[in-house]
Image (cartoon, helix red, strand yellow):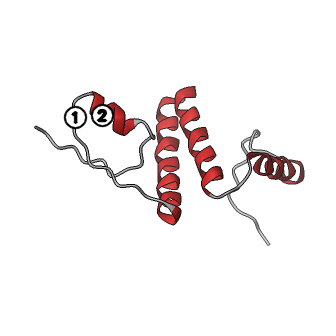
Amino acid sequence: MKKITYNKLVRDLIPQIIEKDGKKAKFTRIIGPKLNEALVNKLNEEGQEFLEAMNMEELADILEIVHALIELNDFQLEDVEQIRKSKQEKRGAFKQGFFLEHVID
């Protein structure tokens, strides 16, 4: 038997999927700040995977993590969306690809 170490947050049904496949795994439940940190780490991981694959499946994973962060922090999706729209109106979106190199003051 080969042991593979992951040390990362996984989706909620992964424990059952691993068990159904006849494998054994060790999971630790995390909450609060540790879960927030793990979700942000997962967001970075999925962001990198999106850059490599550039497909909707990876983008959907990013969105799932954003939804989890909203729920964990007792935010409302509607409130987050309103803030997004407000910032877009005041400062714009990220559609035009402006990359700020420097400002001379």
SS under mark 1 = loop
Quadrant position of the C terminus in the picture: bottom right
Disc 1: which residue: 23
Task: Give residue 76's mark.
Answer: none
User: How far from the left and from the top, in percent, is residue 4?
Assistant: 22, 43
Q: Residue at x 33, y 52 (%)?
A: 7
- In the image, 103 versus 94, the foreground residue is 94
- In the image, 95 versus 20, the foreground residue is 20
Q: Can residue 83 be spotted in the picture?
A: yes
Q: Can residue 55 be spotted in the picture?
A: no
60 sits to left or right of 14: right
Q: Pick out the residue farthest to the right.
A: 89
Residues at marks 2 and 1, CA–CA distance in whole angstroms: 6 Å
78 sits to left or right of 53: right
- In the image, 85 versus 32, the foreground residue is 32
User: How far from the left and from the top, in percent, is residue 3?
Assistant: 17, 43
2 sits to left or right of 51: left
Instruction: Please rate how many residues cluster around mark 2, counting C-alpha atoms within 10 Å: few if below 14, some from 14 to 19, many from 20.
Output: few
Quadrant position of the N terminus in the picture: top left
Q: Residue at x 83, y 53 (%)?
A: 87
Q: Are marks 2 and 1 in contact (CB under 8 Å)?
A: yes
Disc 2: which residue: 18
- In the image, 101 versus 45, the foreground residue is 45
